[in-house]
Image: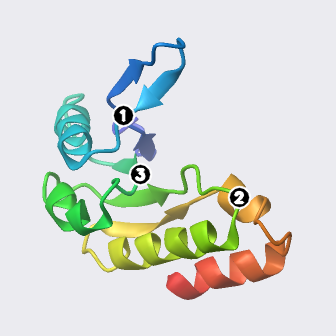
């Protein structure tokens, strides 16, 4: 991709199976740091490589997590939940992480398409306001 000067978005996760057989992504700071370190070393160059990263379980850990790499990153929306309080909490997590130097934007999908109150325009306006 770099040879063709095309951007590549890498979405790294450390995952495991639950007792019920479901796949679970580990959003601890340690796991996200490890996944960033592994994915940052893929290929012969990191030119044109971006990371798509979740906000960690503890958003206060994001500064340490983002120090793992100099690659630009966008934030994933993740599973926000069904209440307006959970949606507001997600916005605050994103707001904090967007202040970090290598975080360049959001890729949040379902979090904005299906907000708890059903007001997609307001959810999008709020997310845009964070940028």
Dividing the picture into quadrants, the one containing residue 30 is top left
Mark 3–mark 1 CB contact (< 8 Å): yes
Residue at image x 44%, y 47%? Answer: 7
Q: Earlier in the sequence, mark 1 or mark 2?
A: 1
Marking on residue 111? none
Marking on residue 13? 1
Marks 1 and 2 sit apart, C-alpha to C-alpha, by: 24 Å
Q: Which residue is mark 3?
A: 54
**Image spot of residue 57 (x, y percent):** 35, 53
**Image spot of residue 120 (x, y percent):** 81, 72
Residue at image x 34%, y 44%? Answer: 27
Q: Is residue 112 left or right of residue 127?
A: right
Q: Which residue is mark 2?
A: 82
The extreme bottom residue here reads: 129
Q: Quadrant of the N terminus?
A: top left
**Image spot of residue 9 (x, y percent):** 44, 43
Q: Mark 2 Cα within 10 Å, few/some/many (few <14, many 20+)?
A: few
Marks 3 and 1 sit apart, C-alpha to C-alpha, by: 9 Å
Marks 3 and 2 sit apart, C-alpha to C-alpha, by: 18 Å
Residue at image x 18%, y 36%? Answer: 34
Asked if 19 appears above or below 120 in the picture, the reply is above
């Amino acid at each position: 991709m770099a040879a063709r000067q095309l951007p590549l978005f890498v979405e790294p996760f450390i995952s495991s199976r639950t007792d019920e057989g479901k796949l679970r992504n580990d959003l601890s700071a340690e796991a996200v740091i490890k996944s960033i370190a592994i994915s940052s070393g893929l290929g012969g160059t990191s030119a044109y490589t971006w990371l798509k990263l979740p906000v960690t379980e503890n958003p206060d850990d994001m500064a340490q997590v983002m120090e793992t790499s100099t690659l630009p990153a966008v934030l994933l929306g993740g599973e926000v939940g069904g209440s307006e309080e959970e949606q507001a909490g997600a916005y605050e997590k994103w707001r904090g992480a967007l202040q970090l130097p290598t975080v360049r934007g959001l890729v949040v999908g379902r979090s904005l398409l299906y907000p708890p109150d059903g007001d997609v325009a307001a959810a999008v306006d709020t997310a845009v306001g964070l940028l």
